[in-house]
Amino acid sequence: MLHSRPSSTALNYYSAYYCPVCRHGEIATLPLMEAFSCSFCRHIFTANLDKQAITIVDSQLPLTWYWTGKRWQTIRSVTRFQWGYRFLALAFVILPTLIVAAGAYLFPVLPNSPLAWFPWFWVGLTFFCHLSCLLWLVLEYYQFPLSLYFEALRNNLVSYLFSSSN
Ligand SMILES: [Zn+2]
């Protein structure tokens, strides 16, 4: 549905742009509305053409992106906001893992005991559980359509395999 216009145009209601959320679909104007909708993740955005910005309206936080002519750019306050969250997210994954690893290192089990592998298995499990919690939160926050994404990947792979076999 991408219109055959150069991608380095100003933000307007007649062109389609890549989606700043999923970076996979295209956002285009909804019929009879001054709003954009993504063809892939189905998020809806309102546009401020004077500021060349779009704001997501169906998310918990009203994230805004500016159109530079070629790509989307987040506003600085959002970026600074996200650095704090990135630090917290890193601490959420690393701190519990370090605490459990310190326990396994400082109080080692006897090497010939049947469950000698268990403390380090627990360290790995702690890491992966906290990492999966974090990934789940990120996917929920952006309301990223994971199943649609995998379906699109599968379709791309199938069409690639089909075209290469011919
Ligand atoms: Zn999207």
Image (tube, grey):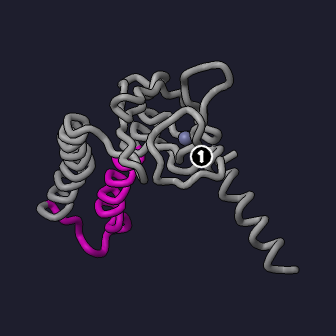
Depth check: give the residue in front, 54 or 24. Answer: 54
Is residue 88 shown to the viewer in this render?
A: no
Q: Is residue 130 magenta?
A: yes
Residue 1 as seen in the image, left or right of residue 16:
right
**Residue 44 as seen in the image, left or right of residue 59:** right
Left or right relative to 51: residue 157: right
Which of the pair 59/1 is nearer the observer?
Answer: 1
Q: Determine if the C-beta at disc 1 is less than 8 A from ligand 1.
A: yes
Q: Residue at x 55, y 22 (%)?
A: 34
Quarter holding the N terminus is top right
State the residue in front, 79 or 37.
37
Q: Residue furthest left?
A: 106
Q: Residue furthest right?
A: 166
Q: Tell me the quadrant of the picture where the C terminus can be found.
A: bottom right
Determine whether 87 is above or below 154 in the image.
Answer: above
Name the residue located 58 percent from the left edge and 41 percent from the top edge. 15
The residue identified by callout 1 is 25
**Image spot of residue 78 (x, y percent):** 25, 36
What is the secondary structure assignment of the residue under circle 1? loop
Residue 158 can be seen, yes or no: yes
Percent across and percent down for residue 76 are 21, 39
User: Within 10 Å of the Cα at label 1, are there few (<14), some (14-19), or many (20+) other Cα atoms?
Assistant: some
Image quarter of residue 43: top right
Q: The disc labelled 1 sits on which kind of residue?
A: Gly
**What is the span of residues highlighted in magenta in the rendered image?**
107-132
Q: Is residue 35 above or below residue 8?
A: above
Residue at (60, 31) in percent of width and height: 29
